[in-house]
Structure formats: C-alpha cells, structure tokens
Image: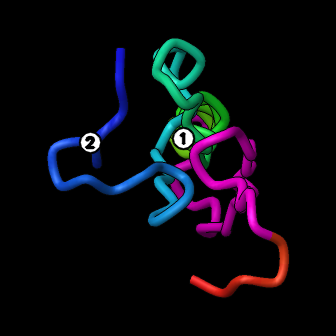
Amino acid sequence: VPLVGRPADLEVPGDVAVVGMDDTDICELVVPTLTSVDLGSQQRAAAAARLLLERLDDPERPARLVTVEPTLTIRESSLDDQPGRHR
C-alpha cells in the first residue's frame, strides 16, 4: 500500500515527513512504514475505568489527575535520507 504524496510527485520521506496517530497495525503495512504517535488509548481507558470505580465506591473522593505519556515510534516515513538538510 503506497503512502500519500505520490500523486503530487512528492517523495515520502525525501520531500515530506508523514506521521500518523495511534500506532495501529497498518503503520507496518504501508510503504514507507509510517512513523506514529501512540496516545495510550488503552492506558487512558483503563485509568478512566479505575477512576469511575473509585468514584462509585466513594462519591466524596476528590478528583485526581492521571497522566498517560505518549509514545513515538519512528519508522521510514519520517527518516531523512539526506543528513544536514532541514525540512
């Protein structure tokens, strides 16, 4: 499966870098493979469920902040084949 950019005669990653979201399996199937940011959807869902259960157990419990760190997986779609060149 070719990645976007070809119709405009743009090379990925030569002319443009492409980054996707959620790091799904398709990131490994496209050509070039797709750099992606995983926003931690599963971790966020698990944290939300825990917070909900805690609130149901104790409605007076104060709210708290839960942070889930994103993960960047760098693949071919964002690698620059010409070191020193800025995009």
Q: Residue at x 66, y 87 (%)?
A: 86
Which residue is more in the foreground, 66 or 60? 66
Q: Position of residue 46 (x, y in %)?
A: 62, 29
- State the residue position of label 2: 6
Which residue is more in the foreground, 8 or 59? 8
Residue 80 magenta-drawn?
Answer: yes
Closer to the N terminus: mark 2 or mark 1? 2
Left or right: 10 with respect to 12? Answer: left
Asked whether disc 2 touches disc 1, contact meaning CB atoms under 8 Å apart, the reply is: no
- Identify the image quadrant of the C terminus: bottom right
Residue 78 magenta-drawn?
Answer: yes
Count residues near mark 2 (Cα–Cα under 10 Å), then give few for <14, some for 14-19, many for 20+: few
Left or right: 79 with respect to 8? Answer: right
Q: Position of residue 36 (x, y in %)?
A: 58, 44
Work out whether 70 lies above or below 36: below
Which residue is more in the foreground, 72 or 75? 75
Q: Is residue 39 visible?
A: no
Return the mark for residue 48. Answer: 1
Which quarter of the figure has residue 64? bottom right
Q: Work out how far the residue at label 2 is from the one at label 1, CA to CA, in angstroms.
A: 41 Å
- Foreground mark, 2 or 1, reads 2
Q: Secondary structure at mark 1?
A: helix
Which quarter of the figure has residue 23? top right
In the image, farthest residue toward the right: 83
**Residue type of the residue flagged with mark 1:** Ala
**Residue type of the residue flagged with mark 2:** Arg
